[in-house]
Amino acid sequence: MSDVSRNLGRLILVVGPSGAGKDTLINRARAALEGDATFVFARRVVTRPSSLWEEHDSLTPQAFAEALAAGRFALAWNAHGLDYGLPREIDEAMAAGRSVVCNVSRRIIAAARQRYAKVKVVYVDAPADVLAARLRSRGRESDVEHRQQRRSDFAAPEADIVIDNGGDVATAAANFLRALLE
């Protein structure tokens, strides 16, 4: 493990299928923990413009490649033909003993566990019909079948906790917040 792995803080990876409501739960937790300096909610950098359903910082593919080559990302991955990264500042936050919460692809769980000593994986899920309806409402009808198939490929043992966000969002948000505070 690198020196980064000895950070005092922890990395909380929020994973799950598209449409599960990861960003919704993260936004509710951010609001509930407003003013709590022990938590940082990292913004991803993505090679796609931000949208109503997914807030992030955007870079062109060329600018992303330059940032990656310059070492400006703590973790980076590719999914659905896009590049994603978490800014290097998460290392500083963890070194200061803070908990960093971020929405990531399950593809980086192993790399994160290798790089950092304290990693918690929170898997957010919802029933297939709920996921499909949410994706359709975003105008991603062409993605529904492909993303449903990928959902079945997830290995549940990778998750430390599973949050069902298929029903009442207030209940799921309370469960998610409790998972962050544990």
Image: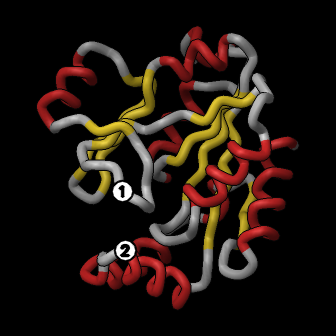
6 vs 176, left or right, is: left
Mark found first going from the N terminus, 1 or 2: 1
Question: Amino acid under label 2?
Answer: Arg
Task: Identify the residue shown where x is 85% and y is 42%.
Answer: 181
Residue for badge 2: 138
Residue 51 circle label: 1
131 is higher (above) or lower (below) than 7: below
Q: Characterize the local packing of mark 1: few (<14), some (14-19) or many (20 or more) Cα atoms within 10 angstroms.
A: few
Q: Characterize the local packing of mark 2: few (<14), some (14-19) or many (20 or more) Cα atoms within 10 angstroms.
A: few
**Residue 179 in picture, x, y percent from top left:** 81, 50
Foreground residue, 72 or 40? 40
The answer to whether the residues at label 1 and label 2 have Cβ atoms under 8 Å apart is yes
Foreground residue, 53 or 121? 53
SS at badge 2: loop
77 vs 96, left or right, is: left
149 vs 89, left or right, is: left
Q: Quarter of the image holding residue 47?
A: top left
Foreground residue, 173 or 77? 173
